[in-house]
Image (tube, rainbow, N blue to C red):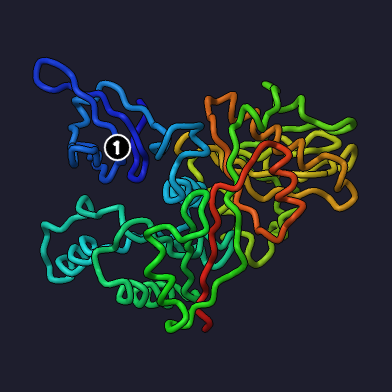
Amino acid sequence: MFDPRPGMRVVLRFRAGSGASDALGQVTAVDDASVTVETKRGPVRVPREDIILAHEVPPAPQRAGRLHEVVSAADVRRVAAHAWLPPEVTWLNRDNLHRDAAQAAGDDAAGPEAFVQSGWLLRAAGGVGREAANAALPLDPPGVETAEALEMVSQWYGQHGLSPMVQIYSEAEAAELAAPCREVAGLFRDAGFSPSEPQLALTAATAEAAAGLSDPAAAAPAGLSIVRSDAPHALHYDAWGHPKGSERHEPFAALMTSAEQMFILSAITGPLPRQPDAAAPSAGQPTLIGTIRVALTHRWAVVSHLIVHPSARRRGVGTALVQAAAAAASQQGIRSLLADVPASNEAAVALMRARGAREHHRHWFALKAG
């Protein structure tokens, strides 16, 4: 049976007396005995033994239209956050602060099941990988004064040996900041935070991005093959600038493989070795022309780390890989696709737009200088 996890949006059908009932909403707590879902009528705790069916569902749309266009910016950021699961993650909110204080005082009743997954999401990946894996993400009111929360962010990142960083974002299809970000953004200047260049959250329907293809391999340009790997190979780490044996390889590899469901698509001139860690044979050694990472979460496909060899650029390899990623996701019933791209990367933005992607919202990373 599908196993719900905190942060997912799910529908649970469960036994209730002599009949059955449903709970639709976000999973807020999971233990060996039960699953708690925050629904429109409040939290519903469902004993595991009473669950009949459990399904993950996409974030709730905010208005009529196609899902990838009408979902809120905050929910898209939740989706993106689950594509990267760094080793250090916590939620900053009043309830968790009270729990931590109670545990420090020796209160045995404040167990891990009391941990609330809402507020500001704090993430630390040792500084490797994407900025989002090393930034605080405001999603819900933290229950404390915003200035106090920002100071706690600075302390938490300092304890992890990182410069404090906060990810903020606009409303969907709007220039103004989303509600969870407005107040904290107003404090950045006095707190010593400077915002980065804007990044675009580009979304698309997988069916449109796949352009009618049902087989990802069929997207391959002439003379190349597109193959799928369940884990990165040494060739991928070389292309991403973190080769095996390098100083930052291990934490980078841990982050790249952290999503609970992910795969790599590669455009190559020959077969990849059978084992991810195996060296390719010297005879007929494959050449990696391009690659893309695809993480599946919350019924979305999140694409990233698209790399094309300089000798093959402007030959349709990148477009083919995005098309193949969309087709592969569509095969698994995924209808929506997301890519976060720097606004200054005109080539990447144009590539995604060519596959039907449109700007959903913008986001920034505000970094506090050390």
Q: Residue at x 86, y 46 (%)?
A: 314
Quarter where residue 2 is shown: top left
For this rendering, which residue is in front, 368 or 14? 368
In this rendering, does residue 234 appear at all?
no
- Secondary structure of the residue carrying numbered label 1: strand
Question: In this rendering, would 35 be left or right of 137?
Answer: left
In this rendering, does residue 226 appear at all?
yes
Percent x, y for residue 210?
Answer: 68, 29
Q: Residue at x 26, y 42 (%)?
A: 30
Percent x, y for residue 201?
Answer: 57, 50
Question: In this rendering, would 129 be left or right of 271?
Answer: left
Query: How many numbered discs sit on the rendered protein?
Result: 1
For this rendering, which residue is in front, 181 or 51? 181
Question: In this rendering, would 90 be left or right of 100?
Answer: right
Percent x, y for residue 290?
Answer: 78, 44
Quarter where residue 266 is shown: top right
Quarter where residue 286 is shown: top right
For this rendering, which residue is in front, 286 or 63? 63
Q: Amino acid at mark 1?
A: Gly
Question: In this rendering, would 108 be left or right of 302?
Answer: left
Image height of 80 relative to 175, above or below: above
Question: Mark 1 Cα within 10 Å, few/some/many (few <14, many 20+)?
Answer: many
Q: Quadrant of the N terminus?
A: top left
Q: Residue at x 53, y 59 (%)?
A: 363
Read off the residue under disc 1.
Answer: 25
Q: Residue at x 70, y 27 (%)?
A: 211
Percent x, y for residue 277?
Answer: 68, 46
